[in-house]
Amino acid sequence: MAWEILSSAFLLFWRRMGVLLTANLLWLGLSLLIVTWPAATAGLFYLVRRIIEEELMADPQPATINDFWIGFRTTWRSSSMLGFGDLLCWGLIVAAMIFYGSNTIALLNWLVGPITLVGIAWGAAQLYLFPLLIHRPERKPWEIAREAFLMAISYPLNTFSLLLTAGVLGIAATILAGPILLVFFSFLAMLQTVAMRFILAQRGELVLKLSPDQREARERIAAKEERR
């Protein structure tokens, strides 16, 4: 399934590289301010979801760069809370590893192993945090974080193969730098969103892609609404 996710993400990214390049540049610029990084990330993922809805679900409303700003404005509060909570969790994990790893009581040193596993699982959960935030806007940030964590440990083979892929791509992008970084983060957002959709489709929560008949029916409905 990991290969299917990667190929689907690349195809969608290739088809809409123009708008995703612009969104990537906006994300880079806003992330430099640090405070606006969570909202900018949410805006990027919101745009990616709109592209998927247009390309795969026959949404008659075309995805544009304006969707980036819609996501930025509508989710800045929840995305900021999610980002702060994420950093807090990382801080607690690192602090616990340092405390128990340097403790003079040998028995407590054994806790480093389980805490490391929690850290790895939390790192894997990063794949699903922002895609879920956009997909479930009605939920609270801590509920999003819990679902992302459970999703990561419930689908370990798929999650960690994608995490490894993202890591390899990240190393390659860092080494090559230059033009690659202009589109890299948009591609990661596409990859993460497609991965989440595949898992939700396995659960029966959504359809990955409309059939030709379903697409035709939706287009007919959209055409009738436009004539009205």
Image (tube, rainbow, N blue to C red):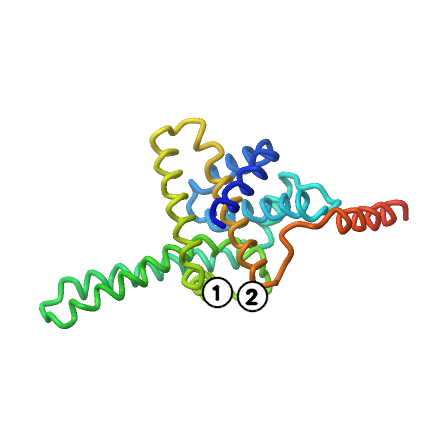
- Residue 200: % across, % down: 56, 59
Question: Which three-letter amino acid code belongs to the residue tagged 1?
Answer: Glu
Q: Where is residue 26 drawn, in percent x and y?
A: 52, 37
Is residue 207 toward the left or the right of residue 178 in the image?
right
Q: Which mark is residue 147?
A: 1
Above or below, comparing residue 129 to residue 171 in the picture = below
Cβ atoms under marks 2 and 1 closer than 8 Å: yes
* Pointer 1 local density, CA inside 10 Å: few below 14, some 14–19, many at least 20: some
Q: CA distance from mark 2 to mark 1?
A: 10 Å
Helix, strand or loop at mark 1:
helix
Q: Residue at x 42, y 40 (%)?
A: 32
Sequence-wise first label, 2 or 1: 2
Q: Residue 23: give x, y in percent of width and height.
A: 55, 38
Residue drawn at 44 percent across, 60 percent down:
155
Looking at the image, residue 208 lies above or below residue 177? below
Residue shown at 60% from the left, 45% from the top: 47
Residue 214 vs residue 90: left or right? right
Extreme residue toward the left, this view: 104
- Residue assigned mark 2: 139
Indicate whether 17 appears above or below 52: above
Q: Residues within 10 Å of mark 2 (few under 14, many from 20)?
A: few
Q: In this view of the protein, which residue sits in the foreground, 72 or 200?
A: 200
The amino acid type found where label 2 is placed reads Arg
